[in-house]
Amino acid sequence: MYDKSIFIQKTSIDRFIFAVENGMYVQAHELLEDDWREYKKIWKDTQDEEYRKKAKAVQGLINGATALALFFIKKRPHSYKKIWEVFEKYKALLDCIELNEKQKYYEARDLLIKINKTIKIN
């Protein structure tokens, strides 16, 4: 568990961006899980393809943060590579869906990509 009181941002995507910017990749992963679960539930209940895409797009961001946690915190580069592939697979879905404050989701995606570019694996 972690101290949730450090996150004073209004939205989950703002909290996610703050966490990633500050190297709190494990926490970032958890900060979008409620959104992911909600989109996934709506999709299962309605079979509305838009919500499946939203769930997968958010899952991609979650996996991006998880991959960074695996590399920087857990020191597991092999696992990092596998999980980063999921981020890569779903990141384009942001272009296909409507989200409130969509620009912030792009910002989160771009931040993950920027940090990932600093990774060197031998």
Image (spheres, rainbow, N blue to C red):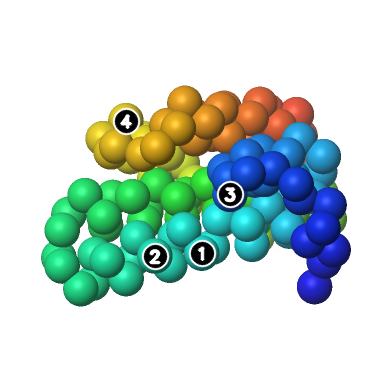
Is the residue under label 2 in contact with that under label 1 (CB below 8 Å)?
yes
Say whether marks 3 and 1 touch (CB < 8 Å).
yes
Q: Earlier in the sequence, mark 3 or mark 2?
A: 3
Residue 19 in the image, given as x and y percentages of width and height: 74, 45
Q: Mark 3 points at which residue?
A: 12
To which residue does mark 2 refer? 38
Residue 110 placement, left or right of 115: left
The label nearer to you, 2 versus 4, is 2
Pointer 4 residue: 95
Q: Sequence-wise, which precedes: disc 3 or disc 4? A: 3
Question: At numbered mark 4, what does the secondary structure look like: helix, strand or loop?
Answer: helix
In the rendering, which numbered label is found on residue 120?
A: none
Q: Where is residue 92 in the image (x, y as percent from the top left)?
A: 36, 35
The residue under label 1 is 34
Of the pair 68 and 93, the residue shown nearer to us: 93
Q: Is residue 80 visible?
A: no
Disc 3 and disc 4: Cα gap in Å?
A: 19 Å
Q: Which of 106 and 13 is in front in this view?
A: 13
Amino acid type, residue under disc 1 in the picture:
Asp
Q: How far apart are marks 1 and 2 (CA)?
A: 6 Å
Q: Is mark 2 on a helix, strand or loop?
A: helix
